[in-house]
């Protein structure tokens, strides 16, 4: 080889930190990439489980009524079908449990399924939204979230373990006081699916 000549015409690859590649977060448990992966996995699981519940094998058809699949026993169908609202609620609660309060709020408030689910699912989601605001030291959204919860379910009470919490107890009591007695409030109709 002659001095000044190069062995290869290809540039040498240099290792760079992930942030220089435009990747915000490679942590699968948090950050935008993790949230996207979690939501995608939950929706894929719900879709797969729903599809499995509706499939029938050809030999499962009833001999009395050809072309109609045999009924799936209730115990089996309940175990197979996963409710997307429950999956999204669980994902939001998991983010809350991990201390990812901003992501929990965003995931729960933008859920396409939680807010059309039965009343108890919506109430639980709203409670975790309120708790998250309180833990982020956001007193106005904390109280406002509790007020919204009480509009959904006027007789709502915190569980004994939740009632004395230093960061949301006062906000809940104030929202409850401002809402007035449950009989004076107009309950929101429960949506049907």
Image: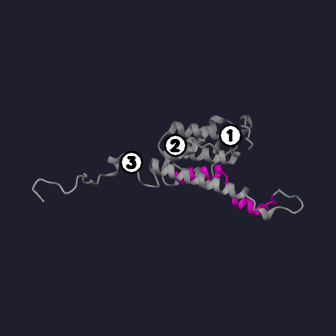
| Magenta span contains residue 10 | no
Q: Nearer the viewer, mark 1 or mark 3?
A: 3
Q: Are marks 2 and 1 in contact (CB under 8 Å)?
A: no
Horizontal side of 45 relative to 181 (left or right) equals: left
In the rendered structure, which disc, 2 or 3, sits on the residue that comes first in sequence?
Answer: 3
* Residue extending furthest toward the front: 1
Q: Quadrant of the image for the C terminus?
A: top right
Label ID, residue 23: 3
For disc 2, the neighbor class at 10 Å (few under 14, some 14 to 19, many from 20) is: many
Q: Which residue is mark 1?
A: 152
Towards the viewer: 18 or 105: 18
Towards the viewer: 130 or 173: 130
Residue 139: image location, x then y, percent: 51, 39
Label ID, residue 16: none
Horizontal side of 3 relative to 23 (left or right) equals: left
- Mark 2 to mark 1: distance in Å? 18 Å
Position of residue 60 relative to residue 132, above or below, is: below
| Quarter of the view holding residue 114 | top right
What secondary structure is the stretch in magenta mostly built from?
Answer: helix
In the rendered structure, which disc, 2 or 1, sits on the residue that comes first in sequence?
Answer: 2
Towards the viewer: 158 or 23: 23
Q: Nearer the viewer, mark 2 or mark 3?
A: 3
**Label 2 secondary element:** helix
Q: Which residue is mark 2?
A: 133
- Mark 1 to mark 3: distance in Å? 41 Å
* Residue extending furthest toward the bottom: 59
Q: Are marks 2 and 3 in contact (CB under 8 Å)?
A: no
Query: Magenta part of the protein: which range?
Result: 69-95
């Amino acid at each position: 080889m002659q001095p000044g000549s190069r062995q290869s015409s290809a540039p040498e690859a240099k290792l760079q930190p992930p942030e220089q590649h435009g990747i915000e977060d490679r942590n699968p448990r948090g950050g935008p990439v993790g949230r996207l992966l979690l939501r995608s996995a939950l929706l894929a699981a719900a879709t797969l489980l729903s599809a499995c519940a509706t499939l029938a094998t050809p030999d499962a058809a009833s001999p009395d009524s050809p072309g109609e699949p045999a009924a799936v026993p209730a115990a089996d169908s309940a175990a197979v079908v996963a409710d997307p609202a429950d999956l999204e609620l669980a994902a939001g609660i998991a983010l809350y449990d991990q201390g990812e309060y901003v992501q929990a709020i965003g995931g729960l408030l933008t859920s396409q399924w939680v807010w059309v689910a039965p009343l108890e699912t919506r109430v639980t989601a709203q409670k975790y939204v309120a708790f998250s605001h309180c833990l982020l030291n956001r007193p106005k959204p904390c109280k406002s979230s509790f007020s919204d919860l009480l509009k959904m379910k006027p007789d709502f009470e915190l569980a004994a373990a939740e009632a004395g919490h230093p960061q949301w107890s006062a906000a809940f009591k104030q929202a409850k006081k401002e809402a007035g007695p449950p009989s004076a409030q107009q309950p929101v109709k429960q949506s049907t699916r």
